[in-house]
Amino acid sequence: MTNTLPVTKGQNYKIDIAGLGHSGEGVGRYQNFTVFVPGALPGEQVTVQISEVKKNYAKARLVKVDTASPDRVVPDCELFASCGGCQLQHLDYQAQLAAKRQTVVDAVNRIGGLADVIVHPTLGAAQPWYYRNKMQFPVGGKSGRITIGCYTQGTHNIINVEDCLIQHQANNLIAAKVRAIANELEITPYNERTGQGVLRHVLGRVGCASGEAMVVLVTATPELPQRAELIAALRDNIPGLVSIAHNINTRNTNVILGNRTKTLWGQNTITDKLGEFTFHISAQSFFQVNTAQAAILYTKAVEYAGLTGSQTVIDAYCGTGTITLFLARQAVKVYGIEIVESAIHDAKLNAKINNISNTEFIIGDAVEIMPQLYQDGIRPHAIVVDPPRAGCAPAVLEAFANMQPERIVYVSCNPASLARDLAVLDSHGYKAKQIQPVDMFPQTYHVETVTLLQRKETTK
C-alpha cells in the first residue's frame, strides 16, 4: 500500500502555527495534515523535524523559528527547554491568559457544540511566579549524588532543580536541603526500573499566610534509614518547619503517595488561609496549589450560585470543604458530599475551626446520596460541583438535574471534560450561561474555570 501521508519521519518542513494544543504545544498544518510542535507559538512560521507520524497527525521537534510571534519572550528559567514542569514560559503572560481563554472557547464550541456561551477574559495572577504551595519532586541518581527535581519532557529522567520559578521559595529550600542531607547520609534513591533503593519522592507544603512548612519523605521501604539524623538536620536547616512525615509507597506505580503516612516529628498538619478561612492541611489533603488564585476562584463560584442567605446549597465532590465554607457564609444550609472518608473528616474539622455550623458533610457517592436528599425533602437553590479532571459520570449529571436546582455551578480544571458535561447538562435542561477562566497555574497550559448554568425554564 502506498504511503500517501505528506510528511516523513526525520525530514524537515516549514509550517505555519495556527494555535495551541491541549498540552501547550504549537499546532500547525502541512498540506492540510496536522503537526504538533512543542515550543512553537501561534502566528509563527517554523522549521520542524518530524519525530513521529500517525494516521491523522504528526509530532515534530522545533528546529528553528523562522518568523517569531510578537508575543514570544525569552524564558526566565534556564531549564525551560528540558524540564517538563512548565510549557508556556516562552509566551508573554498576557498572551498566556488570552490563549487559555481561547482553549476554553474552542472546547465549548467543538466538543460541547455550544455556540452562545459567554467566556470572559481569564483572570490572571498578580504573582505569576513562585506561587505553588505544594511540591512533589521525584528522586533519582545514586547514593552520594542524589538528584531531586523534575522529569525531562516525555521521559522519567530526573534533572536537579535548584530554583523552580513556579514553586514557593520555601519548597525550593526544602528540595535543596533534603538533597544535601540525603547525599551526606548516603540514603539511596529509588530506582523505578529495578525497584531497589529507598527515597522515591520529596513532598513539600507551605502555608502562604502562616509561613508553616511540612516535609514529607516518600520511601519504597517501611523504614526510613538514619531517621533521627535526618529529622535533626531538617529541623536545623528549614525555617518555619512544623511537620516532618514519612509516607510509605512500596508499589510499582507512578502514583506518588502510598496509603500509609506517619508523622515523624511535629504536627500532623500545617495551616493556611483562603480568604477569611483557616484550613488545616495534612500530607494527603487536597488543597489548591495557588492560594491567592483559589480565593478568587471560590469567590466567583459563590457569586455564580446567586445566594441571598436564605437558600440551601449542595456541594458535590466537596473534598476537604474549601468551597463549602465559602458557600456557607451566604446560605442557610450547605450539604457537602464526598466519597473519600478522610476528606470528610478534614472538612468537618475545617468547619469547626472556622465556627461554621450550617454545614453537613456526608460520606458517599453523589449518585446515591442526592436522590436520598431529594426524598428527604431537600430542594437546593444551587448545586456546586468541582469534580476530578475526568469530569462527571452521566449518572451524576442526571442526578444533578433531577434535583431541579435553579442553578448549577461547575468548577473544572479540564476544558475538554467540562465541555462534554455542559452538553449533557444542556440535554437535561440546564443552559451554560457564562464561563469565567481563572489562571491557577501560570506558565503552564492548565486553566481552571467556573461555569454558571441555569435551568432553562427560569432562563430569561
Image: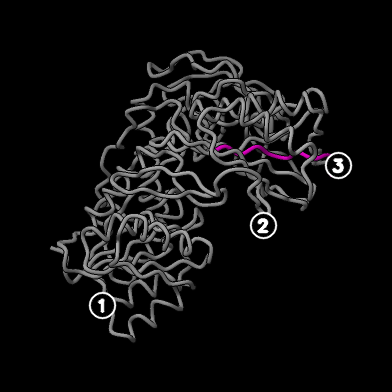
Residue 453 is drawn in which quadrant? bottom left
Q: Which is the main secondary structure of the residues drawn in magenta?
A: strand
Q: Residues within 10 Å of mark 3 (few under 14, many from 20)?
A: few
Tell me: 145 left or right of 45: right
How many numbered marks appear? 3
Q: Identify whether 372 is placed above or below 278.
A: below
| Residue under pointer 3 | 196
Element marked by disc 1: loop
Residue nearest the viewer, comparing 91 with 65: 91
Q: Which mark is residue 87?
A: none
Q: Identify whether 340 is placed above or below 190.
A: below
C-alpha gap between disc 3 and disc 2: 20 Å
Element marked by disc 3: loop
| Residue under pointer 1 | 379
Say which quadrant the C terminus sits in.
Answer: bottom left
Identity, as a three-letter code, of the amino acid under mark 3: Gln
Identity, as a three-letter code, of the amino acid under mark 1: Arg
Determine if residue 349 is in view.
yes
Residue 49 percent coordinates (x, y): 65, 23
Q: Residue at x 86, y 41 (%)?
A: 196
| Residue under pointer 2 | 259
Q: From which residue to which does the magenta span run?
A: 195-204
Residue nearest the viewer, comparing 186 with 1: 186
Q: Identify whether 43 is placed above or below 102.
A: above
